[in-house]
């Protein structure tokens, strides 16, 4: 763990968590859209979704994954969605902070037939100090800690 500012600290899980699909994940794992990977590929695929205002669902912050006996409170989530531009970069098209539930239906429609990257992280108070988890990332390219990157979660929007 390392401080990111005098009052905020980042929690970086030492071990990879595995989501139900066998793809390694750090941070909060996505539940929907599910992670998808091509056979023998180290990169994630862009699973199709059926809405331009999808509901993104992720694993809630689990106090059990934190190596602490302290009290956790004030859990909120920070969500980001990017429309891909080239490679694994993207333009930020949707952002929400202060979400209190581990899911969110986008309030503004995304463009049809586009590939998107997304990630989420949790903010919380532990024994009176502010903490934040690492951005959720998946796949075998988990080295980068900035988002978006090649390990960001993904989906593709449908035609109109």
Image (spheres, rainbow, N blue to C red):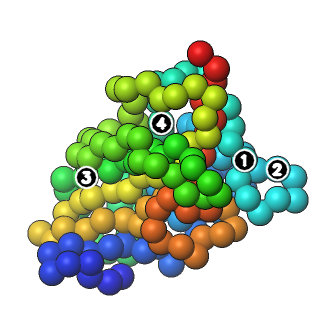
Q: Mark 4 or 1 closer to N-term?
A: 1
- Which numbered disc covers residue 126? none
Q: Mark 2 or 1 closer to N-term?
A: 2
| Mark 2 and mark 1 residues within 8 Å of each other at the beta carbon | yes
Q: Residue at x 47, y 71 (%)?
A: 145
| Mark 1 and mark 3 residues within 8 Å of each other at the beta carbon | no
Q: CA distance from mark 2 to mark 3?
A: 34 Å
| 117 vs 58, nearest the viewer | 117
Q: Residue at x 53, y 73 (%)?
A: 144
Q: Mark 1 or 3 closer to N-term?
A: 1
| Mark 2 and mark 3 residues within 8 Å of each other at the beta carbon | no
Q: Exactly how many numbered labels are in the figure? A: 4
The crowding category of the residue bearing disc 3, from other C-alpha atoms within 10 Å (few below 14, some 14 to 19, many at least 20), is some
Residue for badge 4: 56
Quarter occupied by the C terminus:
top right
Q: Mark 2 or 4 closer to N-term?
A: 2
- Which numbered disc covers residue 75? 3
Mark 3 secondary-structure assignment: strand
Q: Is residue 49 visible?
A: no
Q: Position of residue 53 (x, y in %)?
A: 46, 25
Q: CA distance from mark 4 to mark 1?
A: 17 Å
Q: Is residue 102 above or below residue 9?
A: above
Q: CA distance from mark 4 to mark 3?
A: 18 Å
Q: Mark 4 or 3 closer to N-term?
A: 4
Residue for badge 1: 45
The crowding category of the residue bearing disc 1, from other C-alpha atoms within 10 Å (few below 14, some 14 to 19, many at least 20), is some
Which tag is nearer the camera, tag 2 or tag 3?
Answer: 2
Rendered image quadrant of residue 46? top right
Q: Is residue 44 above or below residue 156?
A: below
Mark 2 secondary-structure assignment: loop
Residue for badge 2: 38
């Amino acid at each position: 763990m390392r401080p990111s500012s005098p009052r905020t600290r980042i929690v970086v899980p030492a071990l990879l968590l595995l989501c139900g699909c066998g793809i390694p994940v750090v941070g909060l794992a996505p539940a929907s859209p599910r992670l998808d990977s091509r056979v023998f590929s180290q990169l994630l695929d862009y699973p199709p979704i059926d809405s331009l205002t999808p509901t993104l669902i992720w694993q809630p912050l689990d106090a059990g994954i934190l190596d602490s006996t302290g009290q956790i409170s004030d859990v909120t989530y920070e969500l980001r969605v990017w429309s891909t531009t080239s490679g694994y970069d993207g333009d930020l098209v949707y952002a929400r902070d202060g979400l209190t539930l581990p899911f969110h239906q986008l309030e503004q429609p995304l463009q049809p037939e586009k590939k998107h990257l997304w990630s989420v992280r949790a903010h919380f108070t532990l024994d009176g100090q502010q903490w934040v988890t690492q951005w959720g990332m998946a796949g075998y390219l988990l080295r980068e800690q900035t988002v978006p990157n090649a390990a960001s979660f993904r989906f593709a929007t449908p035609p109109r």
